[in-house]
Image: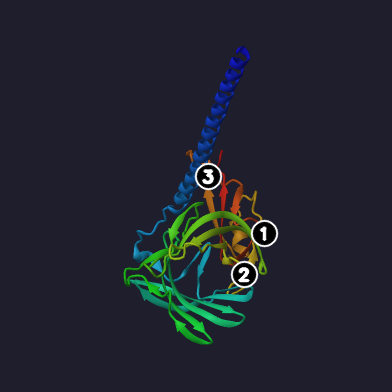
Amino acid sequence: MEGIIVSRASLFNEDRVFVLILILLIIGSTAGLIGIKGSAAKAVDESNASSKKRFTRDFNVDKNNLGPTGRNPFFVLEPGYTIVLQGKDEGEKATVEIKVLDQTREIDGVVTRVVRETERIDDEVVEISMNFFAIDKVSNSVFYFGEDVDLFKNGEVESHEGTWRSGVDGARFGLMMPGIQLLGARYFQEVAPDVALDKAETVGVSETVKTPAGTFKDSLKTLETTPLEPDVKENKIYAPGIGLVQDDNLKLARTTGVEMIRVPNIHGMLNPDPVLTRTGLRPKGIPIHGPIESDAAGIGEAYRQLPRAGALVARGTTVTYHFWWESQ
């Protein structure tokens, strides 16, 4: 009997162990599922947070300050200026020519500059758009007032899809290129409901890009998206003094209507303005440490120049630099 009692006790203990192990397995599995659901929920939350980034779509601009001609560091609105981008689009040869025309158009009460963009696939024209821009003479920002679009098939116009103008059917002008570049800036370039809602985010301000036309430093990189095509994303890179030098797989092949020059090294110069002016550039010195006293005098050495020395830019590009004030 004693042996039997011991055996039953052992069996009882084994049953308890088995139940305990089963409970632990259930708890572990539940915790794992909770963890997985928690991770999934976190991923969804992060995705939603990313998609809910806020973009500026209303621009408080005095239209009296807007005009059809000017030069933003990354966007040129001067008649005759032309850039040509080349590359591959889904394996086919693609060319985009963007030319600033000697034409203006009044849109939504503003005289805008007409910029023609022609896209070719394997040398066949597939799209021609007339775009309307104006530059703010105070902020140096470039605003986008709409476009007339011709889409071609077999050499004939098939549709005008994408056409919009500020002030028509609820459309409003957007910001094409800010006058001051800030990393993380987000803004709508087009505000035409159900037609064109392109928006851009500044994701880089010191990019270096190599193109058939040369290597460009201190370039601006943007990420363009639109709620009308949520899966479409485009990266564009703009070089100082040049403008658009890369549009996804297309890169700058050549420019016309502007002379390209190299930025000289002015680091350490006491008065770099004459050097920059003789080179064909526009100097803009920024005082950093003065004058802070009544006896402050003179200009110290130049530093932190942008675009940097050796950069390839268009004649007339503004070169900014910092300088120290020295007290005697």
Locate the N terminus and report the quarter of the image it occupies: top right
Location of mark 3 (residue): 288
Q: Quadrant of the C terminus?
A: top right
For residue 136, say whether it is visible: no
Instruction: Point out the frontmost of discs 2 and 3.
Output: 2
User: What residue did someone put label 2 on?
Assistant: 252
Instruction: Mark 1: give few (<14), some (14-19) or many (20+) Cα within 10 Å.
Output: some
Q: Is residue 171 left or right of residue 80?
A: left
Against 21, residue 297 (above or below) is below
Residue farthest to the top, as pictured:
2
Q: Note whether residue 148 is visible.
A: yes
Q: CA distance from mark 2 to mark 3?
A: 36 Å
For the image, the number of numbered tags is: 3
- Which image quadrant is residue 235 in? bottom right
Type of amino acid under label 1: Gly
Tag 1 residue: 310
Q: Amino acid at mark 2?
A: Leu
Rounded to the nearest angstrom, the CA distance separating label 2 from label 1 is 18 Å
State the SS at label 2. Answer: strand
What is the x, y in percent for residue 261?
64, 66
User: Which image quadrant is residue 132 in?
Assistant: bottom left
Image spot of residue 326 (x, y percent): 56, 41
What is the secondary structure assignment of the residue under circle 1? loop
Residue drawn at (41%, 75%) of the image: 163
Residue 58, located in which quarter of the rendered image?
A: bottom left
> Is residue 166 positioned above or below 127 on the image?
above
Q: Is residue 169 above or below residue 233?
A: below
Q: Earlier in the sequence, mark 1 or mark 3?
A: 3
2 or 1: mark nearer the eye: 2
Along the line of sight, the residue nearer the viewer: 10 or 33: 10
